[in-house]
Each structure stands twice: as C-alpha cells, then as structure tokens.
Image (cartoon, rainbow, N blue to C red):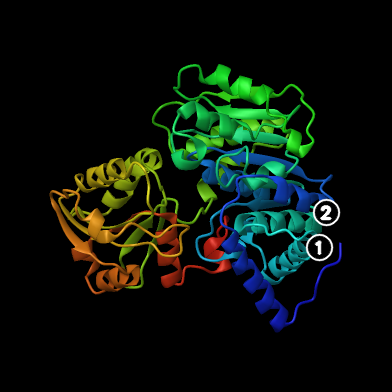
Amino acid sequence: MSLYRLNMGEVSAIRQWLESTKQSGMSLHLSTTFAMLNELNLELNGTTIIHVAGSNGKGTLCSLMATALSLNSDSNILFTSPHLCRVEERIRWNGRPLDAAKFDEALMVVEQVSNKLSLNPTFFETTFLAAMVVTSMYQPKFLILETGLGGRLDATRCAPADLSILTSITTEHTDILGDNIYQIIKEKAAIARPGKILIVRKMPISGYEDFVTQCAANCAQQELNETPLDTDCTFVEINDGVTVLDEACALAREAFMALSISVRRLDEAKILVNWPARQQQFHLPQGHKIILDAAHNPTGLDRVKNHLIELAKSENPEDRLSLIFGTSPQVELDVMLKLVHNICDHFSAVTLYLTKPQGGRYPGVEPSMLAEYEWKGCSVKIVNDYRDVIDMLSNITPHDAGPILSIGSLYLQGNILNYLGKNTDEDLSLLPKQ
C-alpha cells in the first residue's frame, strides 16, 4: 500500500475533507464501508480482531483489554468513538493516541478510495476505515473495535472479527434501534460472526440467552458475503453490585481465555488503566479535586453513581459538592435528572451548575430546560458556557466549593478536558507514564 509524505497544505486539505464527511450524516447500511474495504484490500491476516457492542460498559471493556495487551507486550490497536478532545484518540496504538501524521496518511488512503469509487463515507465510517488502514500498516497482533451504534448495520460489522463480545444491553437509541428491548438485542447480537465465538454478559431479561443464541445462529449477512455457520455463545454471569471495571474484567478474562491470550496482567490493568472521563480524578492548579464521568444514559449513570458519591465524599469533611451537569437529548431525560438529583441528596450542601455540552452529534439540552426540574435542596446556577463554569469554580476556594463532579454528556467532559489543557498524549493514554 502506498503511503504519503504530507506537506502542510496537504495536511490542511485532508483534515478539511475529513470534516466534510460529517455532511454525510449517519449511515444505516453497510454497502459503502464494505465496498471501500474490499477496494482497500488490506493485509489483516496476522491480526486477531475483537469486536465489542453493548449499551453500557463497552468502552471500559475495550480500554481494559487494550491496556492488558500492552502490559503483555502484545501489540494492539484500539478503535473507539466518539473522541473526547481530538480525533486521533479514536485510533490508539498500544494505548496511545495515534500520531497525527500517521492518522493523516491513513486518511489520504481512505480519501483516494472514496474518490475512485465515487462514494461518500460518513465521518464515523471514515475514521473506522482509517483504523483498518492503520492496522494494515502496523500489523499488530490484536485489533479491538468498539461498535459505534447498534451492531448489525454499524460500519465496524464489516471487519472480519475473530471474537465478539456483548456487554450489558438496555433500551437506548429507540429512534434507530427500535423501542422494544428484543429489537435492540437483535441489532446488537448481530455482531456475532459465523463460526466464531460470541461472549455475552448475562442479563435479567426474560428468555435472554435463548434469544441471543437464536440471533447469533442467524448472524450471517448476505450483504457481507458471509456463509451461515454455527456460532458458539458463551454467557458470563456478573454478580450484582460489582463495579463497571470488575464486570469488564470478567468479560475480558473469558475473551482472553477463548483466544489463548494470557490473563495474568488483567488485574494489574484494572488498577492502571486510564480511561479518560470515566470516573477520572485530578486536581486543578487552585487545589480543587475534580471528577469527570461520561455515563450518558440513565442505566449507565445508575451503575456508577454510588462510586461517584464515594469519590466525592472522600476527604470532604464539609460534605459539600459542586456538580456540573449537561446532556445531549435523550428519551428518558426525566429518569436521568432524577438520578442526578439522587446524587445531590447525598451531600449536605450542593451547588448545581447546569450547562450545555458543545460539539456533539446533536445540540445539547438547554440549561434553562434542565432547570425546570425540581432541584430541591440544591443551589441551582444556569451557565450556558462550560468555560464560565470552570472559571467561576476556580474563583471559589476548594474548601467552599467542595469536590467538583462533572457528569452527563461525554462531549461535556471532553470540553472540560480541552479547556483545562488535559489533552496531551500522556493525558489521553490508557497507561500512565511508568
């Protein structure tokens, strides 16, 4: 495959082209991605591909597996979405965001194929195809792919995965995946590959295992030229009350054993993994402790809220809390707000800053609308610009502000990390500097 040495003009042009792909919106078919992958004719035979889907916990699982592989000295590429601070995060090489120049080289290859076939991939399809090009360039032992949305019609489904994993499944994206939990299960279970292994987190849903097994048995997609073969489903019991990381570790262990990968570094990876904006803690220069979490739906927030409360209560004798909340539109917004209020109820004094995330697929919910909820026991401030929130808190002493907890939209957490300058390769790497 020919690659490019780029001058500054070419770098600017390829990034402009990438930005232009956002005009293609969202794709609900595989034909563009599949045609471009076939044209690319990438060398992937030496790479084992793991594909992950689910409603909650899939990003944590992917980051944990990539961290453990890096600790094992097993070369790996991790593709995730969306990105927090900059697009290179979507492709991590051994845990670190891909070098910008390499990212641009891969984009040039994708653009060339796009022009040759007269196809207009979406932004997500483009970044996924770039990840596949980088995989062919680097020839890692492992490639981990996080599904963007659903599974059956997600661009990542075009990759020839060797093993697939389903994390927890809940009712989400009902406008696209269906408003029935079984329709959503069917969409996500379709990441199973004919003749390969599917690792599945058990769910307390009636007939769940039989339904997933049935979906996996019919996973072959004619559009992808797949031949129907038996799929081996392995269901993993997850105990109630475990953390998201514990759940990820259990699923990763099952997947590693199925692929004959050493599991000896998984527990270490669970301690070391730095998955930005997922229960992430650091201190501001003024001394404030800040906690960021990007649980973006009610089920996800419910899973982590007790741990977030524990983190915010630690070394907080005054029991104060400054809570920043902003969200993208969602069907169960009232449930989300109730959970946020429940977090507030655990503290003696709470100042709630309602703000608006920037840069998401959809405009954030207006803070004035969020303020209409009955925030009993909270001092509520409407601040449209997240930067103003950070500046306001910086001018309050750490003692008076208490810990700062920012929750809701992943885009909001990315906004904050960028504003605070916490967006270097080191900040965004899965493994902290050793």
Q: Quadrant of the C terminus?
A: bottom right
Say which amino acid is labelled 2.
Answer: Glu
Residue 181 appears in the picture as rendered? yes
Label 2: element kind = helix
Numbered badge on residue 75 = none
Q: Is residue 228 left or right of residue 286?
A: right
Q: Residue at x 62, y 20 (%)?
A: 214
Q: Residue at x 61, y 55 (%)?
A: 124
The outermost residue toward the front is 118
Q: Is residue 182 above or below residue 50?
A: above
Q: Is residue 182 left or right of residue 318?
A: right
| Residue nearer the viewer, 24 or 41 | 24
Q: Which residue is mark 2?
A: 39
Mark 1 → mark 2, Cα distance in angstroms: 9 Å
Say which amino acid is labelled 1.
Answer: Lys
Q: Quadrant of residue 388?
A: bottom left
- Residue 359: x and y in percent read 46, 64
Q: Quadrant of the N terminus?
A: bottom right
Q: What is the crowding at mark 1: few (fewer than 14 residues within 10 Å), some, or many (at least 20)?
A: few
Label 1: element kind = helix
Q: Which residue is mark 1?
A: 116
Q: Residue at x 45, y 26 (%)?
A: 239
Q: Is residue 351 above or below residue 200?
A: below
